[in-house]
Image (spheres, rainbow, N blue to C red):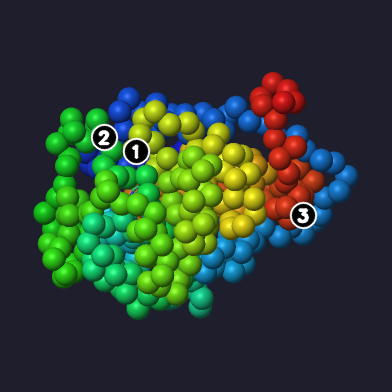
Amino acid sequence: MTLRELHERARKTLDPVVYDYVAGGAGEERVLAANERAFDDYALLPRVLRGSAVRDTAVDLPGAPRTAPVFVAPTAFHRLVHPDGELATARAAAAEGAVLVTGTAATTAVREVVAAAREAAPDPAVWFQLYPHPRGEVTAALVRRAEDAGCTALVLTVDSPVFGRHARDLRNGFTDLPPGYAAENMRDLPGAPPGGLLDIPMSPEAGWAHLAELVRGTALPVLVKGVLHPDDARQAVEHGAAGIIVSNHGGRQSDAVPAAVDCLPALVDAVAGRVPVLLDGGVRRGSDVAVALALGARAVGLGRPVVWGLAAEGEAGVRRVLATLRDEYDHTLALCGGRRNADLTADMVVAKGGAR
Ligand SMILES: Cc1cc2nc3c(=O)[nH]c(=O)nc-3n(C[C@H](O)[C@H](O)[C@H](O)COP(=O)(O)O)c2cc1C
Ligand SMILES: CC(C)CC(=O)C(=O)O
């Protein structure tokens, strides 16, 4: 089954309101559409007579040595789409050797998520995503939970000073979690009520000091997610980021930003190899992975496709999504005359219709 078919199955399975929450984007969904379309505008110029029957696609990421080049981006509320929720996602990602980013908005506590990943693989990499919180003690408590659970990196999402305006959710009246679901990591935190969508902090006044404080307060590497401007990538590195995730939140925050992959080259330049640059948004095929890696990304994240796999088939569906992308990417690498990711170089990426 292709990713497209899994998406279709998920659409048929899900409550339409939940489907819209996952599928939707901000505003007129221009950025949502642009993320995928941007990949359509790139083509790959293969190199010939230099390939290998054995290819090595593993990458080193912070807190995740020798991992898959495709990771599971943080997406909220997995129990809304499948009763096994984040436990299924964790087992699937671990079994496929992919980093799982769980986070503040998970409907399963991070301790249980890491335990599930460890059932599926001896040394899984689970990262924990959080937003800058106005109260330092809340951030500190979340970080302790992630550390105690065994997470190997933190991800600070910085593209959400305010929550995006999701037209579908506003139309559907979906503005908080239904009864019976909670953001489990938010339970019993100092001064924070448990755990609906409205309790998840967004802090319009967060600054670079928040990042520096987070970095100082943990031994874990901290990646910064949601960077689009090259100067912000430089600032993030200067404030201690161990990695940059180029992302427009899957078109769910500003509806006026460029497609994620179109921002990638400038950020790769700005970071100049000091830390790995990752990307998410619109990745749907192995060739999209190849384009992003050729343009300088160390790895790429999948948001919605993982949720569709989970909704359609639970753990097996998430495994299928990750395995499909891995196989397609490996095949593309072979067709491009590559034996390792570094054999994909920026000169091999051209605009559709010709060399640039
Ligand atoms: C339903 C949903 C929930 C999301 N929740 C979060 C979140 O809690 N934290 C976060 O940093 N990003 C969140 N994102 C953004 C993803 O991490 C990622 O940036 C985006 O989905 C990538 O685009 P793609 O869906 O086209 O693969 C969410 C995305 C979706 C679709
Ligand atoms: C609970 C929200 C903060 C999750 C999110 O980031 C999103 O829906 O895009």
Q: Is residue 14 above or below residue 125?
A: above
The residue under the point 70% across, 30% down is: 350
- For mark 2, give the secondary structure: loop
Q: Amino acid at mark 1?
A: Arg
Asked whether mark 2 and ligand 2 are closer than 8 Å, the reply comes as yes
- For mark 1, give the secondary structure: loop
The residue under the point 65% across, 54% down is: 273
Q: Position of residue 14 (x, y in %)?
A: 27, 43
Q: Earlier in the sequence, mark 3 or mark 2?
A: 2
Q: Amino acid at mark 3?
A: Arg
Asked whether mark 1 and ligand 2 are closer than 8 Å, the reply comes as yes
Q: How far, Cα to Cα, is label 3 from label 2?
A: 42 Å
- For mark 3, give the secondary structure: loop
Q: Which residue is mark 1?
A: 252
Depth order, front residue of 52/227: 227
Q: Earlier in the sequence, mark 1 or mark 2?
A: 2
Depth order, front residue of 325/189: 189
Position of the C terminus by quadrant: top right
Q: How far, Cα to Cα, is label 1 from label 3?
A: 36 Å
On the question of residue 50 being in view, the answer is yes
